[in-house]
Amino acid sequence: MAKRKPTTDAEFARQNEQATRAAREADRIEPRAVAVGYDRDQALILVHLRSGVAFGFPPERLPGLENATPEQLANARISPSGDGLRWDELDVHASLSGLVLDALRLREWAPRIMGRIRSEAKAKAARENGLKGGRPRSRGKRSTTPKGVSDK
């Protein structure tokens, strides 16, 4: 097994800053729970998000909760980052992003309004470009290297 080089302080600081920026961005755009509970009258698990939005889902939608008692369902906990839910007694863990995607069926209808990621036309164009040697090089791209300085 190859020996791994120790990380320098500068490299560690760079990686830490990069991870901190990524975590802040995820925290800004992804759903984060501030409260979770079980509503017996509606038979729904209710999740309140930091954004002020709340949503509910029937326990049967999450594997492992379908046969849980109301008391067990009420024992939901929020992960420290707010991006997940867990029921320790039932050994059930769920991603909040996944729950929202599933609850709103975003994978099914969002591409209609946001533009398809995959389409037959895009696949055909990609195949044709591949046969020609791939995407053509950009013609008008200017070098950002100052005159007289090599960029190699």
Image (cartoon, rainbow, N blue to C red):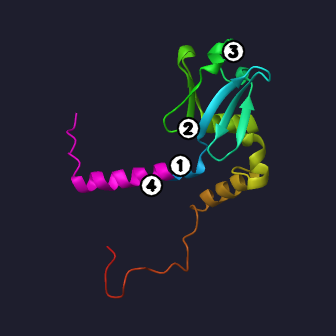
Quarter of the image with the C terminus in it: bottom left
Amino acid at the residue labelled 1? Ala
Residue 115 visible here: no
Magenta residues span 1-24
Q: Position of residue 106 (x, y in %)?
A: 73, 42
From the image, tell me which residue sits under label 4: 21
Quick one: label 1, few (<14), some, or many (20+) residues within 10 Å?
few
Kind of element beneath mark 3 = helix
Q: Earlier in the sequence, mark 4 or mark 1?
A: 4
Residue 26: image tag? 1
Amino acid at the residue labelled 3? Pro
Quarter of the image with the N terminus in it: top left
From the image, tell me which residue sits under label 3: 70
Q: Nearer the viewer, mark 1 or mark 3?
A: 3
Question: Which residue is at 69% across, 11% downward?
Answer: 67
Residue 83: image tag? 2
- How far is disc 1 from disc 3 in space, using C-alphas? 32 Å
Q: Is residue 3 left or right of residue 112?
A: left
Amino acid at the residue labelled 4? Arg
